[in-house]
Every structure is written in structure tokens, then in C-alpha cells.
Image (cartoon, rainbow, N blue to C red):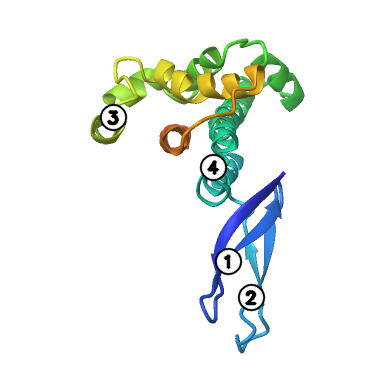
Amino acid sequence: MKIPLYLSCPECETKQYVWILLHDDEVNYICKNQACLHNRSATFSVETMRLGWRLILRSQYELVETKDYALSIVMSACAFDVDVSRLNIKWQGIKELEKGRMYDSIILEQELLKHRKTIEKLKNTGKLLSPKGFDGYVKDSKKYQESISSGFDNIDLDNPAKSFIKELFYPRNEILHRCKAIYTKEQAQSCHNTARLGLNILWDMDLDRRSKNA
């Protein structure tokens, strides 16, 4: 899979899409502006860009550029899903180390797969990140209370985890399991915005967990 990065030339500020492979650490930018006076190439590091954010960029590209709304929805759901899985394996591994036990990431991934339902995986990951869990963290966060109340009428603040699953994975399953591919721009935009919100919540939960673990 390839991920589009919308970059600016460091010299002439020409903007263009540059495609990288999903797990690339660097991107080589070659300016398309023939009048650019520098050597027309530059290298950017993307090593720290999380997989979830890479996939959300692909979702945005399909939404805005190709208008493939079904693919945008699938990428949005995938972005949220992979970040949940990444954090689960990360903090489960740290938990094992804190107990003085070595861990195997393959075994941790196998344990993760035992959560047959995505909402179970999300709630389990939430407990690893916060004693409040995913729902409790969102409910007690003034930041997300305000942003959800003002801009996300699809998220129920009394049950945010279930809302994320319904908004992202129900349409994804319709596309992948039942070949329903007719979606509107508004539906794809809603999924995209919800996935971005979810990634930000997970980022903050991970950051808080790291600060307490330091």
C-alpha cells in the first residue's frame, strides 16, 4: 500500500503529492517546478509518523482527490483499528516487563486476536491506557466533551466506544463483507472526521499513560 504526503518544496514552496510505501522511514521529494533554482530534491524523515496517521492520510486522499468514498471509509476504520492494536500490544508488553517477564510480540498479537469483537479490543486497550477505560476517559475529558458536543452528533457521550464502532466499523463491514459500495461524500467525511477524533483521543491517552509511567 502507498501513502500520499502533501509536501511543499523547501525552496520555492511548490506543493505536490509524494507517495511513500506504508512502512517507509523517509520520503524523497523531487520538485516538479522546473524553474526552481535549487537541486530540486529534498529528503524528509517520516520515521515517527504512526501507522494510523499514515492511513488517515490515504483516507483523506480518497475522500478529496479520487472521491472514492467507500475506500476512504475503509481507510478511516483501518486507521483507528491499527492504532488500537498498536497501543494494546505496546502496553501489554510494558505490563509484562513490569512484572519481570519477557514478552513476545507475536504472542501478544495472538492474545489480541482473542478479542473477537472490535469493541472488546477497544475497551481492553482503554483499560491498559487508563484506569477509567476508553469511555471513562472521554467522559471525564473537558477537551473531548466540548469537541464532541459541538461537532460530533454521531458520538454518544454516554457510550463513546460503542459510537466509534458503529460509526467506523458498521459501514466498513458493509463494504468489505457485503460489497455495499455506494456512499456519499458526507458519509465518508463523517467517518474520516470520527477516525481523526479517535486517533487524537488514543494519542492523549497514550501520552497520559507515558507520563504516569515515567
Q: Are marks 4 and 3 in contact (CB under 8 Å)?
A: no
For residue 93, the mark is: none
Residue 141's disc number? 3
- Distance from disc 4 to disc 3, alpha carbons, whole Å, reads 24 Å
Are the two marked residues, 2 and 4, in contact with CB atoms closer than 8 angstroms?
A: no
Q: Callout 3 environment at 10 Å: few (<14), some (14 to 19), or many (20+)? A: few
Q: Disc 1 residue type? A: Gln
Residue nearer the viewer, 211 or 199? 199
Dividing the picture into quadrants, the one containing residue 178 is top right
> Please, what is the three-letter code of the amino acid marked with disc 2?
Cys
Sequence order check, earlier mark of 3 and 2: 2
- Out of 190 and 97, give the one closest to the viewer: 190
Query: What is the spatial separation of the Cα atoms under label 2 and label 1, in whole angstroms?
Result: 8 Å
Query: Nearer the N terminus, badge 1 or badge 3?
Result: 1
Q: Are marks 2 and 1 in contact (CB under 8 Å)?
A: yes
The residue tagged 4 is: 56
- Vertically, is 65 above or below 118? below
Numbered label attached to residue 31: 2
Q: Quadrant of residue 152?
A: top left
Residue 16 disc label: 1
